[in-house]
Structures are given as C-alpha cells and as structure tokens.
Amino acid sequence: MSKASVGIHPRKAALRFAWARDRVHGVLPGPLRRIIPPTAVGFGALSLFTYSVDLLVLSLGFDVLGLPYPVAVTIGYAIAFGLSFLLNRWLNFQVHGHVGRQTGRYVLTVVANYVLFILLVASMLEAVGMHYLLARMLAGACEAVFMYSMMRLFVFRTRRAHTRLRTP
C-alpha cells in the first residue's frame, strides 16, 4: 500500500507542521521571537513527543520487564532519537541534503549526548538515590539545549553562499 493510497502526503504534512510551528512562534513576545528561531519551537514540539516515547519505553523496560536501568534507558534513548532524527529532518528543518552525511553527523551527536547526559548525568543521579524518571528528566533538559544546537549548527546545517569581495 503506497503512502498516497492511505492519505499520507509527506510534503503536505511538512507544510502543515511548519505552518503550526510558525503560528506558535508568532505568539511569542517580541524579544523572545527575535532570539528564538521558529525551528527551536518545532524542535521543542517534536522533542516533547519523542521524549514521551523515550520515557514510556524506559518505564516499560525498567518497571514491567525488569531490565537494568542502563539497558532500559539505552533502548528508550535509541528509539526516541531515531524517531527524532526522522521527524526533525522531515517536518521541522525540511532538509533534503545528503541523508548519509546527515545521519553520520547525527550519530556522532547522539553518541556525545548519550555519554554526557545519559551515562554520566542521569546514571549518576539515579545511583545517588534520585528516582530514575526524575534523573532522566533533568538530564533531558540538558539534552534539549545540546541537541537543538547540534542539529541546527552541525547535523542539518545548510551551506550559505559566500560572496567574495572583489578587490580593485
């Protein structure tokens, strides 16, 4: 069954997402609107969704299946960040560049993020007695800033045409 036969139109969905993202960005107070780009609003919306998936998988793995915390958090993390890459590439940043290169950059970013915020921050907080979900939420706040910055500046960066100054 093709996407068109079930009513899914990738370009239309991306345009609708951009429209909604830009409307939300438009209601930000003026000073914030000048500082925060529309893609940050879109990243936030998509991150809320993928982070919910992450926490759901973590809870199921840790509470229901009894997996060790590092294993459960890794599974949730992997699923959520794969989904985040796809949704941000398609809906938020709407890039069409070389997917292999972007995937490679994204994997580097995710590995750095995992080591810094999951293995170090979240696991240390959980090990000293903080509830595992609270530990993951605090680490998630740090992740959000790091991941948006890296996606915008490194993973989905666009080349800008450089104008050369002519010398007489």
Image (cartoon, grey):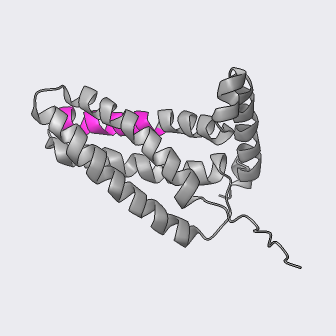
Spot occupied by residue 138 in the image (x, y as percentages of width and height):
31, 30
89, 119: nearer the viewer: 119
Residue at the image point whose x is 60% and y is 38% from the top: 40
150, 111: nearer the viewer: 150
Residue at the image point whose x is 51% and y is 45% from the top: 148
Residue at the image point whose x is 85% and y is 76% from the top: 166
83, 19: nearer the viewer: 19
Instruction: Report whether 140 appears left or right of 88.
Output: left
On the rendered image, what quadrant is the C terminus found in? bottom right
On the rendered image, what quadrant is the N terminus found in? bottom right
User: Of all residues shown, which one is farthest toward the front?
Assistant: 168
Tell me if residue 64 comes above or below residue 157 in the rendering.
above
Residue at the image point whose x is 46% and y is 60% from the top: 106
From this viewpoint, is residue 4 visible?
A: yes
Spot occupied by residue 154 in the image (x, y as percentages of width and height):
53, 59
156, 92: nearer the viewer: 156
Instruction: Report whether 110 appears left or right of 92.
Output: left
* Number of numbered callouts drawn: 0
Q: Main secondary structure of the magenta part?
A: helix
Instruction: Report whether 9 appears left or right of 147.
Output: right
Spot occupied by residue 91 in the image (x, y as percentages of width and height):
65, 47
Spot occupied by residue 31 in the image (x, y as percentages of width and height):
68, 25
User: Of all residues shown, which one is farthest toward the right?
Assistant: 168
* 59 in the magenta segment: yes
* 41 in the magenta segment: no
Region of the chain picked out in magenta, as a range: 50-63
